[in-house]
Image: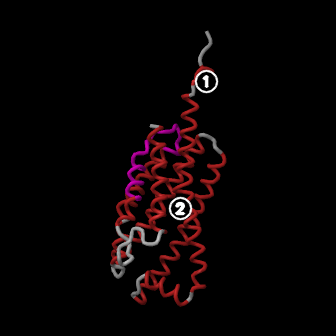
Amino acid sequence: MTIRAIRSFDSIALCVLFFLILLLSPGAARDQLDRLTLVVALPVWIAAWFALRMPGKLLADERWRKVMPKLRLWAVLAAGLIPFVSWWYINSSSTYLLINAVAACYACIAFCYYINEAAMAVAGHYESETPHKVAIVTRYGIMYFFFCSFTALVLNLGWDFYQTARSPIDVFSGIFVQHPLATLPLLIAMALWLLLIIVSGLAMPMWASHLLQANQESVTDPAVISLGAPHE
């Protein structure tokens, strides 16, 4: 079970890295009209698969057992809703696709949150102070900054869409062209969102994988076994 958890954490971290590369690289996961394709959903699907493969009874810790069902639930929701982001990008005038694309963003945020929670459970179980503190800071960053600021952005764009029927893509492109300085707070917020995704979805899973591997090696180390063997 430990090996399966190590592989799952490593694979999720790689999927998050691949997802960020696809989003941030010009022309990646886009068609000839510069619209997102379903390729962007591939790393989310793979990460969700490995989240579902996480062993539910890996640690004798109540935190691990509580976080696993929530991690699996949000993994399924993120995997199921992520195609709507691409579909809405192709047809940005559809309210139905817009609502589901926003729901996909929230599901991915929650998925990152519970990946961080799972890594924090590992750090707490092995009493590793530094990753545990980083996970706590990341938890509150996602809860109080990422979630709240993203919700404020969604409400603002939703109100604009209700009044003018302009899609968020048109709103963003107009603001960037006409008032570039007005986008500075948004760019700062997006940079912090990116940092939280990197820490929760990339750094913390790798940290948890390292802790699991280190403790597994210490248990299987012949020197440790000989020290714990009874003397004749």
Total number of numbered labels? 2
Q: Is residue 130 left or right of residue 213?
A: right
Mark 1 residue crowding within 10 angstroms, few (<14) / some (14–19) / many (20+): few
Q: Is residue 132 left or right of residue 9?
A: right
Q: Secondary structure at mark 1?
A: helix
* Residue 189 in which image quadrant: bottom right
> Which one is nearer the viewer's eye here, 183 or 102?
183
Q: Identify the residue at horizontal 52%, vertical 72% (top origin).
A: 150
Percent across and percent down for residue 227 are 63, 21
Percent across and percent down for residue 24 are 49, 69
Residue tagged by mark 1? 223
Q: Identify the residue at horizontal 41%, vertical 58% (top origin).
A: 43
Which image quarter is the N terminus in?
top left
Which image quarter is the C terminus in?
top right
In the picture shown, does residue 167 fall above or below 188?
Answer: below
In the picture shown, does residue 210 fall above or below 40?
Answer: above
Q: Is residue 58 magenta?
A: yes
Q: Earlier in the sequence, mark 2 or mark 1?
A: 2
Residue tagged by mark 2? 197
Percent across and percent down for residue 52 are 39, 49
Instruction: Please name the amino acid that badge 1 sits on.
Output: Ala
Q: Identify the residue at horizontal 62%, vertical 12% (top origin).
A: 231
What is the C-alpha distance between the residues marked 2 and 1?
Answer: 39 Å
Q: Which residues are magenta?
A: 43-64
